Image (cartoon, grey):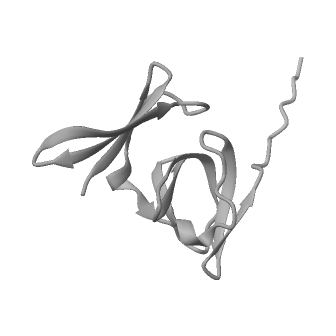
Amino acid sequence: MKQRLLVMNGRSILENDEAGEWKTQKVAPAGMLKPGIYNLYSATPANEKKPYTGPVIHVSKEIVVQAVQGGLVQFPRSAFDKVPELGVPKTIQLADKRAAVAEPEVQARSIRR
């Protein structure tokens, strides 16, 4: 089943594709999520050897979806002790089927004159 998440006007709208038509399943406040259309069905499974940095955009009973540079990545929900807050950037890495969640590294900006 295809799912997508629409974030607009302060709302996040979860939709399912049923026989070629998008049907709204859930409407909730967007919170910290950036506006956009997120095709959840295009999320690729996370690689255990790689850390991923970006905001978590969707949490269901089975998966956690994170927006990263270059697309969407999905993690099994069972890998998390505590699921990260939606819309807040985090670095997530799988190790032995467990998810390690950390704050992303912040690059310092320097000004040269």
Between 93 and 108, the one nearer to me in the picture: 93
Is 14 placed above or below 60 here?
above
Q: Where is residue 96 in the image (x, y as percent from the top left)?
A: 64, 82
Q: In which quarter of the view is residue 14 placed?
A: top left
Furthest residue to the bottom? Answer: 96
Q: Where is residue 31 in the image (x, y as percent from the top left)?
A: 59, 30
> Is residue 56 rendered to the left or right of residue 2?
right
> Is residue 87 rendered to the left or right of residue 74?
right
Residue at 45% over, 18% down: 9
Q: In which quarter of the view is residue 108 placed?
A: top right
- Asked if residue 37 can be seen in this view, the reply is no
Between 27 and 86, the one nearer to me in the picture: 27
| Quadrant showing the C terminus | top right
Is 44 placed above or below 84 here?
below
Residue at 87% over, 29% down: 110
Q: Position of residue 95 (x, y in %)?
A: 66, 77
| Quadrant showing the N terminus | bottom left
Q: Tell how many labels.
A: 0
Q: Where is residue 11 in the image (x, y as percent from the top left)?
A: 46, 27
Residue at 75% over, 49% down: 104
Between 6 and 104, the one nearer to me in the picture: 6
- Asked if residue 90 can be seen in this view, the reply is yes
Is 47 placed above or below 86 here?
below
